[in-house]
Image (cartoon, grey):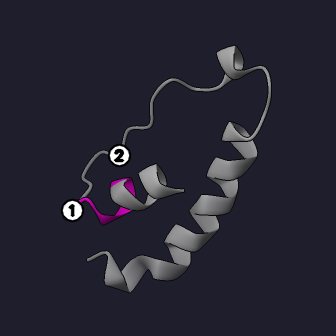
């Protein structure tokens, strides 16, 4: 469940920000995919990051 993975999610947020806070925007990834996303908590948190 999403609640049990909060530490993992927080660590992942830092990695996501390091990728998506770069210029030029055209070189940033266009998608994020999460296979086996459970209840979608991780994808929601990534979107809100």
Residue positioned most to the front: 48
* Image: magenta residue range: 39-43
The residue shown at (52%, 73%) is 8
- Quadrant of the rendered structure where residue 33 is? top left
Regarding mark 2 in the picture, which secondary structure is present there? loop
Residue 48 magenta-drawn?
A: no
Main secondary structure found in the magenta portion: helix
Residue at mark 1: 38
Q: Residue 34 carries which label?
A: 2
- Quadrant of the rendered structure where residue 31 is? top left
The residue shown at (68%, 54%) is 15
Relative to 17, is 3 above or below?
below
Q: Which of 40 and 37 is in front in this view?
A: 40
Measure the alpha-carbon separation of dots 2 and 1. Answer: 9 Å
Give coordinates of residue 17: x percent, y percent.
68, 50
Give coordinates of residue 10: x percent, y percent.
58, 72
Residue positioned most to the top: 26
Relative to 33, is 16 above or below?
below
- Quadrant of the rendered structure where residue 42 is? bottom left
Q: Which of 5 and 17 is in front in this view?
A: 17
Q: Residue 48 carries which label?
A: none
The residue shown at (46%, 80%) is 6
The residue shown at (67%, 39%) is 20
Q: Is residue 6 left or right of residue 35?
A: right
Q: Is residue 49 left or right of residue 37?
A: right
The N terminus: image quadrant: bottom left
């Amino acid at each position: 469940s999403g609640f049990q993975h909060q530490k993992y999610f927080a660590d992942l947020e830092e990695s996501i920000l390091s990728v998506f806070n770069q210029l030029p925007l055209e070189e940033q990834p266009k998608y994020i995919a999460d296979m086996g996303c459970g209840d979608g908590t991780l994808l929601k948190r990534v979107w809100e990051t």
